[in-house]
Structures are given as C-alpha cells and as structure tokens.
Image (cartoon, rainbow, N blue to C red):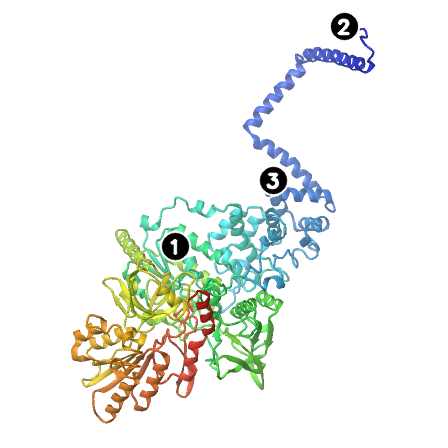
Amino acid sequence: MTATLPPTGPATGAREDLQRYLAAQGSLEASRSELTQLEHSEEVEQFHQQMELLRRRLLAEPTAFREMFISDGMAAVAWEFSQPELGKQFTETLWGLLRRGDDVSVLFMRFLWNLPLGKKRMFIRAIDAHLSDRYPMFDGLSKGWPASISIPPYIRTPEERSQDFGLVNQGYLGYMNIGFSREDVDLFIWLEAMRDKQCAEKPCELGIFLANHKEPVGGCPVKIHIPDMLELIGEGRFRDALELIEGANPLPDVTGRVCPQELQCQGNCLHKESPIQIGQVEWFLPEREKLINPDSLVAKFAGRPSPWDVADKPPVAIVGSGPSGLINAYLLAAEGFPVTVFEAFHALGGVLRYGIPEFRLPNELIDDVVNKITLLGGKFVPNFVVGKTATLQDLKDAGFWKIFVGSGAGLPRFMNVPGEHLLNVMSANEFLTRVNLMQGLREDYETPLPETAGRQVLVIGGGNTAMDAARTARRLGGNVTIVYRRTQSEMPARVEELHHALEEGIALQVLRSPSEFLGDAETGFVSAATLDVMELGEPDDSGRRRPKATGATETVKADLVIMALGNAANPIIKDSEPRLHTSKWGTIDLDHDGSQETTLGGVYTGGDAARGGSTAIRAAGDGQAAAREIVGAIDVPGDAVSAMVASAHEYTEKAATAQKIVSTAELSDGIHEFVVHSPVIAESAKAGQFVRVLPRPDGELIPLTLADWDAEAGTICLVVQGVGTSSLEINQMEVGEAFAGIAGPLGRPSDVHEYPTGSTVVFTAGGLGLPPVFPIMREHLRVGNHVTLIAGFRSGDLMFWVGDDERVGRLKAEYGDQLEIVYATNDGSVGYHGFVTGPLEEMLEANKRGEGRTIAEVVTIGPPLMMRAVSDLTKPYGVPCVASLNSIMVDATGMCGACMVPVVVDGKLVRKHACIDGPEIDSHLIDWDKFLPRFRLFKTQEQRSRVAHGLA
C-alpha cells in the first residue's frame, strides 16, 4: 500500500519529484520481493552453481579461457581471409594488434607467417591499399611482392650525410629517427622475413657448390642458419633469432654492416631482382635487443666464472683484434678457455677500427664485441706487436697452449711510377688510419691530416677501400675523383658503396691509370697527375678484361693522391718465425685443406694473414673455423693445465702493465730523459730498435729510438726533444704518470759484424742522435769492435751524457782505448770547431793515405741534413754508411706506408719503409733529394697545433 500525502505548498515541480520517488520506491520493493522468491527457484540455484564453477576454473586455468577467446578471434580473422580482399577497418584493426608488441602480436605474426603465399599477398595488398597514408614505404609494395620489391632500410640523404661522419645506412631502426615507433620497425623487419621462401637447398646459408672450387660460391662464411633465423622472425620470435645468430657469430651488428652480402648470402637469394635484406636483418637484431633491454649483455653473462679462475682448460693466445681474432676469442672464451688477445694498436678492432669509417661502422659496435669477450673473462693487451714484442715461441714459452694469428693486412701497394715520393701522395691505409683510428678529423686530437678542404683529391683504385677513402675525403671538404683503370662495371667495390659515393658528389674517371705524379719543385707537394687513357683487352685470370694503355694521356690537377691498391703481406711474424711456411706472396700457409692450422703445430691462422686481401666476413669465418678446431683438440693432461693458466695469466698481466715514468731528467735545453716501466719491451729490446709512443689518448703516435733498457728492472730509456706539440707535452710529464701506450721494440735491430783488428766503426751523432747511437756502439764494443764516436752539439752547454758518471763516460771507463771519442761543437766551445763531418773527413783522408784505423763502416744518426752530409761525404771514399731514419710514421708496423724511403737499386727508384726495412738503411742508396722534403709534410699543421696549445 502506498501512502499519498496532501499538497503542502504551491511548488508543483517539487510535488512531481516527490511522487516519482515514491512510485519508484514502490516498484523497487515489489522487485525485491520478486527477486527473493526467484532466488530459491531450482533454475536460479543451478545458474549460481555454474557461475561458481566457472569462476573456480578461471582461477585455476586462466589460459584455457584465453585460448578460447583467441580461438574465437582467430576464427574471425580466418573468416576475413576467406573473403576476396581485406577491408579497411579489419586491416587497421589487425595492424593495431600486430603493433601491440605483446603475445597477441606474436600470435598474429605466427598466423600470417603460416598462411599460403596467396593469402600473404592479400595481406600485403591490404596494407598497401589502407595503410600507405601512414606508412609511405607501403605504397606500391604489393606490385611485385615478394620477388621484386621490399621495404628498403632508411638511408640518409646525400646532401645531409656528405657533410658529417654519421651513419649513412641507418637500417630499419633509422625509421625511428623520422617518427616511427620501435614496434613499427619490428613489423618492417617481420615483413622482410615474410618474403622468405624457406628454400630446402638453403643457398643463402650454404652457398652453391661448383666443381674445382674449394669454397662454395656465396653462402655465409660464419655459418649463420639464415632460413631458420628468418622463420623465427616470421613467427615473431626476435630474441630467439638473435640467440640463433650469436651462437655462430658474436658480432652480427658488425658483419651485418660490412659483409658484402651481394656476393655472399644475398647473392644466392632466389629473389634475384630484390634479394631479402639479410644483412640488415642480421644487424637489426642485436641493436633491437639493446633498445629493449640495455643491460641484457651484463645479465646474460652475470655469475659466469672467469676461465682464468676455473683453470680447467688450457690458455689460448690470439694475435690481432680484427674480425678473425674477435670471433675466435669470443667462441673460445664462451667454451671456457682462458684467452688473451694481443693487439698491435692502442685501440682494439684492427681493420674494423682503423680501416672502416664510422659512417659505415660506428666504433661503439666494435666496443660491444670487446665488452662481450671481456664479460666472458677474455683479456686484451694493446700495444703488443707479436713478432717484435714477443715471438710465437715466446708466447708458447709463457704458457699459451695454442695461438691463433689474425694479424691482418700488411704493406700497402703502390704503382712505382715517377712522383710517388711527392708529399701528399699516401696510401689509403695511412689516410684512413689518421682519420678513423687517430681521430685526426677532430680538433681535440693531435694527429695531423693532409689539407683536404677545397683541394683536388684523386683516389686511385676501385675497391671498397677506395670508396671509404673517397667518401672520407669528401666529408673533409675535398673535391674528390676516383680514378680506375677499367670501367665502372668491373669495379670490385660493393655496388651500394659506389652508388653512395656517386650520390655524394664524388666524380669517377674510368679507363684511366696514373703514369706519373707531378710536383711543385719548391714545396715538394704533388700538384698534378698524368693519366694514361686505357682500353679493355682480353680477359685476365680473374675473368675481367685486362686494361691496356692506348698511348693517349691527360694531365689533371691533384693536391692529394690516395693510393687504394690493396696490400702485400706483413712480414713481421713471418720474419720472426722461420719455421712458419709462407706462400710466394708472403701469406701464411695452412697445413692442409679443411684446417686453419699452420705448418707450425699449435698455431692457427685466418683472415688477411692467410688469404691476403679479403673481406671481414671471410676473416670472421676463418676465426670461427679455427675456434672449432681448437675446442676439439685438447691434448694437455689435466694436472698440467692449471700451471699453464697461471703462467699465461702472469705473462698477460705483465704485458698489460701500465707504462709509468720511473724517473725523468732534463739533459739539455728542451731535451728530457725518461725511464719508463715497460717490462716486455725491456726483455725484447735490441740495439737500433725504436718504440711507437702515444703520450695520451688524444695525442699522436710518434717514433722514438730506444736509448737504453734494463731487462732485469723492466725499464726502458727514452730521450725526447720538444719540437712538436706531442713531444713538448711529453717533456711536461712527471714521475708516476703513464703513457697511453708504448709499442715495440720495432724495426730491425742493428746489423752488428765483427771487424778485423786495426779497423774502427765510426758513429756520427748529431745532437739528439747520441741517445740512439749509444746502444748500437755498445753492442759493437761488446763483440770486440773498435768504435770511434764523433758526437756533435751546437755548443758545450748543450752537451749531455758525456760526464764520467754518465752513460758515455761509463762506457769509456769500461772499454778504455777500444772506444775513441771526438766531440765537435758548432761554436768551438768544446772539442772540434765545426760539424761532425770535419773529424770524419780527416779520418777518411788519413785512410786514403794509408794512415790510421781503417773505417769499416759509418753509422750516422741525427738531423736529416747532417745524415745526408755524412752520406755524401763517405760515398766517394767507398766507405759503407748506414743512416738510422726516424721518419714520419703512423702505425710503425708496416701497415700504413707513411715511413716511405725512396732508394735507388740497380738504377731504379723503389720504396723501402723505415719501420720494416730499417730504421737503418744504406745511406748511399737513399735518394736524399726526394726523401728530405718528407720531414716537412705536416709542418703547417704542427705549427697550428703549437699555437692552439700555447706552445709556439
């Protein structure tokens, strides 16, 4: 019963609200009564029981319901794919689900991956038709997909990229820089994987085997399971794909960028018009992982014990940290072997760092690989030149069980045409090392570069190194022309690199070959090149038509000439180990087919050391193959392993010790002596050798002759005259400070012969020539030779090491009359008034008269003009004379060719290199007119640097 109240006021609206409320209340009470009655009905009680069971099952088996809903959803998706075409709304919804980046996305990726090709094409048509406004790269994608069209990686415009050293081909992740998401990029890569045919023959992975070929044509040298990788990506399993790759190749983000895929995996792709972008996919995966989980690398190896601590496998030494050495070190360390990588440079990476510009391969990717090896317990020793700092036998004696030699390329090739001695004619190795490794392009680094901005630059050659050099010079502001003796179609460079070079404004002159370089007579710098006009004749052994001169020539302006003609083998390791068999080209021979082991048991090799000029990916394949051999060849008794590990670890620590200054003294105005802790160099040093010094990380590499050493104390002695910025800054260093790197001993030791009684070996030392003379004349005294030292100084107050308790004085006290000393000063304040040539000429004239000791040979060390004067003086008398040449160098191991010395042999001008053939070279063979200007190569740059540092 509902109560009705009489109106209490004039407000009609209020009464209506009240009446509605009372009516609703009445209805609610009636419904509640009815609900109470129904709650106890049999049907409702059964419903509640079913809901409770459903709730319990949901809690116990949540995936069952997820699968039920997914099944219903996939059925709906499958129905859509049964229609003639996919509609706009469905396509957008499906794409949104794919972009979620979760399990649902993976589910739909897997569904689409498993569709037949016709349905995949339907999907491509749909995204082309309905999503191209948001994704311009989808526009037209359906026309020719999957065989002849794909989504390209993101490449910066020529106008933008030619002005800096930023990455050119930024891959699919580059799309993130223009507004696309990481999930979008995942789908771009997934779409590329969707093109794969899953070929049973796997030509991309295995290559194509031909009769009479040792290696297959194409394929993957590091044995990546490419079809499996693409299938995992197709199923949305990106991390599994990465793990698959890294199981074979720990540096995919390096090899994926620099490998010539068009000759390897992609060259065999059945999509001939547009091969699958395998290289791009390869380097995308590790970069994606870094984006998603920056700490994944540390987490992956966390808690892993160091192989050096476990010490249950014998230690392995790796020579060189290029692609072959890095992959070898990683795979062995991952298998639990203690490994030490010995690298000649101060920075790791080998050719990957010094030879490949950062616009192709960022250095941080090399650092990633080094970090992986370090996390696995691997150790690195920079500034260690195997063959000089220690021999292969020394490493074995130190406890290393096996050795892998991946020492890389050697001496750069030149053409031996007139004018190659001119200033600013240099190898691509030198040019790229100055820019890449030594960072000479940066204002805050000291290594000088040739003047390039606005200058005419010629790059001679048509390979990848030529492209790198040309594109680097372009970025430094040069007007660059590539000169190649064949036509464009015969160029061995990667098609992509040549295409990018031409896009960036680099000119190409084909069917041209330099026959002479012309120079400025006053400055000694190159000014022009004479080019032979070529034509193609019959094919040579490589199958390319052989170029031949037509007789016509043309002359072009040239301010800088960069020679990119390949490399000969580096002789350092070969010369230090005569038991190691080498080919006629100087490359290290393998003992037998199917093995990377050399003819010296326990020593393996690969990469350019064995192949000559090759590619980074083939070098990596060799390193991988050698690692597999080493892993399966343990032949050391278990009780001997721990002792070997302890010995190798002790040697590694000693070799990697900081090279700190023990003592220093000012010998004369601007000349300082440093005693430096450097035990492995002290143990190996010989008279006449030098070291390569890097004072600080942003400094330049400079050669300094060893003045003395003490193997027992583990120290070396250097004497430095402050001239350029680097040497002036060295002279400001104090006791306890460490050099960024000292490598050596380098160069050939002095050739010390025993001479007959009555003869003498004459040393002419001008100023700073006395310190390098000191150990050589000491060695002659030790073998019993009489020595005459003619030491020249500007004046008496600048003399050093001549007191009774100083080095020369102590040597005189030890050897007495076996050592005769003559001092000469320019001002006559001490000894002979004049230059060192005065006393020498008197001795030569006395010999001519049959008087005095017979001069067996003359060794001259000092200022270049003094050495030339001594050489010119001795030549008419027929007295042998050697000059120790401390010329301009970069790597000082023969790789760059900067220390070129023009010599005349049998009437022909040929190149020698002070770091490989010297530093002591027969002075009578040197063409001094061509050699002396080389000391002025960077005079302008050095002066600018002194001004910038307040040292002028």
Image coords of residue 887 (percent x, y): 39, 75
**Labels 1 & 2 near each other (Cβ < 8 A):** no
| Residue beneath disc 3 | 104
Image coords of residue 380 (percent x, y): 37, 57
Sequence order check: which comes first, mark 3 or mark 1? 3
Tell me the tag on residue 401.
Answer: none
Q: Can residue 205 be seen in this view?
A: yes
Judge left or right: residue 506 versus residue 856: right
Tell me the tag on residue 1.
Answer: 2
| Residue beneath disc 1 | 332
Of the pair 297 and 164, the residue shown nearer to us: 164
Circle 1 Cα neighbour tier, 10 Å, few/some/many (<14 / 14–19 / ≥20) = many
Q: Separation of disc 3 and disc 2 at Cα?
A: 58 Å
Q: What element carries label 2?
A: loop
Q: Can residue 387 be seen in this view?
A: no
Q: Quadrant of residue 29?
A: top right
Q: Is mark 1 on a helix, strand or loop?
A: helix
Q: Separation of disc 3 and disc 1 at Cα?
A: 39 Å
